Image (tube, rainbow, N blue to C red):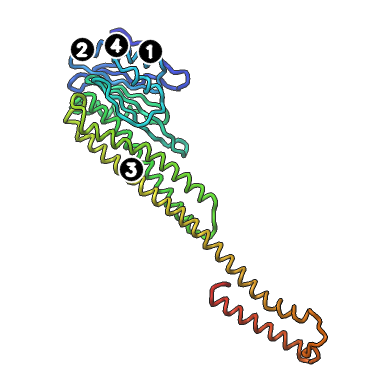
Amino acid sequence: MIAPNPLPMDPACTGPMVVNCVAYTADGRRLRAITVEEISDVLATPDQWVWVGLHEPDEALLEQLREEFDLHPLAVEDAHNAHQRAKIEVYGDSLFIAAHTAQVVNGKILFGETHAFIGRNYLVTIRHGASLSYAAARRGCEQAPEMLAHGPSYGLYAVLDFIVDNFFPIVREFQQELQELEEEVFQDTFKRATIRRLYDLKKELVTLRLAIAPLQDIVNQLTRQFPGLIRDEVRPYFRDVYDHAARINESTDTMREMLTAAISVNLALVGVAQNEVVKRLAGWAALLAAPTLIASWYGMNFHDMPELASPWAYPTMIGITAGVCTALYVGLRRANWL
């Protein structure tokens, strides 16, 4: 057998642009790895189909795939540009699917895209940006040839299921971080970093929802439409993916509401704390105002002030001032102003 040509390498990437290019038989068995040039020959062979996995391919490789699979130029152009909205489009007897992916890298959530072409006898997946390799999904399919016998539609299910399942750990991480932030919100000291993290978390949740919500519509269409491309036996599996996507979407909506409430509560607690400080300052100001007012009367030095001549005037005024301050202090303490 002729040795296959080496896989093309992208200078900007650490791995090959062609991750996998494999031919399968109609009964789901892995036949062999093939080169890109052999794709059209395999497609012309009855009872065989091809699954190609790409990672950030260049324009030349995509043009080669367009010729091998006879793909629509507009779909290939979309696949080359990694800034597409999540969607599903029909081009003749093939489908083009764009889905957003997410991955935690160094403690931060990064988003990427996966584009897929599916025809009657081929499946092409293209990864851009942050996304785990679909090698695990492919291995799972190859270990169940009776399911892979359903053709490219089962491979597409495995990829979409892998994408959706990768959102669950991110959602759980969000939930754990939200719980920690809620505990910080109710602490006695105000932390500006807490508000900042709450805002950043809400922003990431909005982006996450924009990634997962369109997948529901995509999977719903795959469940109900395209009878020539999606086997009826695979549709229940797509319904399961839809259920997972719906659960993630509901979780993100719930966390967004909780984050909004946490931000509001935090700001309200800050306002309450400021009011308490103002009340205490006002209470002490009232205590200081009483002796200041009494002392100011006797600081005017009028000649006709009869009590000035009394030998008990000074201790009497001290007692009156102390009594007024004591009464104010007791009253303010009962009113929780001190």
Q: Which residue is mark 4?
A: 38
Residue 138: image x %, image y %?
29, 27
Q: Amino acid at mark 4?
A: Glu
- N-term-proximal mark, 2 vs 1: 1
Residue 39: image x %, image y %?
28, 13
Depth check: 144 or 62 in front?
62
C-alpha span from label 3 to label 4: 41 Å
- Residue sitting at x 57%, y 76%: 332
Q: Is residue 224 visible?
A: yes
Q: Which mark is residue 6?
A: 1
Binning the other alpha carbons within 10 Å of mark 4 as few (below 14), some (14 to 19) or many (20 upward) gives some
C-alpha span from label 3 to label 2: 42 Å
Q: Amino acid at mark 2?
A: Thr
Residue 33: image x %, image y %?
29, 16
- Between circles 4 and 1, the one closer to the viewer is 4
Residue 229 to residue 214: above or below: above
